Image: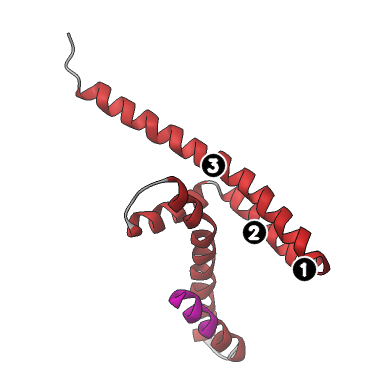
Amino acid sequence: LAAGIVFAFDGYVFYHMRFENIFWTIGAAVFLVALAAYAIILMYIFPLLARFDNTVFAMFKNSLFIGMRFLLCTVLMAAMLFVVINIFTPAVIFGEGLCALLCSYLLSNILLMCQSQKEDASTQKTAADMPHL
C-alpha cells in the first residue's frame, strides 16, 4: 500500500512536470519500469502466497521473476484487465468477474508448472545426496 501511494504521488508529479527537462525523461523512464515491476508483483504475489510457504522477501522476488519468466501470460492478463476496465465498464459485475476467472486459469497453469519444477528439483537433490551402491 505504501509503495502504491508513493507511485501515485510520483505519477502525479511526473504528469505535471512533463517534458520540461532531462530529469523528467530519466525519472519517467525509471518510474515506468518500477511501476511495471510493481504491477507484476501485484498480479503474482497473492496466488503465490496461497500456494507456497516462503519468506516475505522471497515471495516478492519470486513473484517478480515468475511474472518476467511468463511475460506473455503477464501481458495477456494485464491486457484483459485493461479491456475489461475500458470496454466493459457498464457491465462491471460480469466483466471483472470474467477477467478474474480467465486470469485464474492462466495463473493455475503457471503455478502448477512452478510446483512441478520445484518437486523435480527436490527429487534430483535427494537423489544426488544418496550414495551410489
Q: Where residue 105 appears, x then y in whole percent?
A: 63, 43
Check residue 76 in the rendering and tell me which mark sits there, or answer none: none
Q: State the image coordinates of residue 46 (x, y, percent, origin top left).
A: 49, 56
Instruction: Give, as a three-letter code, the residue at label 3.
Output: Ile
Specify whether 32 is left or right of 92: left
The residues colored magenta run: 1-10
- Would you say residue 6 sits in the magenta stretch? yes
Q: Label 1's element?
A: helix
Relative to 122, say whether 10 is above or below.
Answer: below
The percent position of residue 34, horizontal first and vertical second, equals: 48, 69
Residue 83 makes an appearance in the image: no
Dot 3 falls on a residue whose secondary structure is: helix
Amino acid type of the residue that numbered disc 1 sits on in the rendered structure: Asn
How packed mark 1 is, by other alpha carbons closer than 10 Å (few <14, some 14-19, many 20 or more), is few
**Which label's residue is closer to the chain start, 1 or 3?**
1
- In the current view of this chain or complex, which residue is farthest to the top? 133
Furthest toward the front, the residue is 93
Residue 48 x/y as whole percent: 46, 50
Q: For the residues marked 2 and 3, what is the alpha-carbon distance in whole angstroms?
A: 15 Å
Nearest to the observer: residue 9 or residue 106: 106
Q: Which mark is residue 110?
A: 3
- Tell me which label, 2 or 3, sits earlier in the chain: 2
Res 78 label: 2
Viewer-proximal residue, 41 or 100?
100
**Residue 18 or 80: which is nearer the viewer?**
80
Which corner quadrant holds the C terminus?
A: top left
Q: Residues within 10 Å of mark 2 (few under 14, many from 20)?
A: some
- Please give the label number shown on residue 86: 1
The secondary element bearing badge 2 is classed as: helix
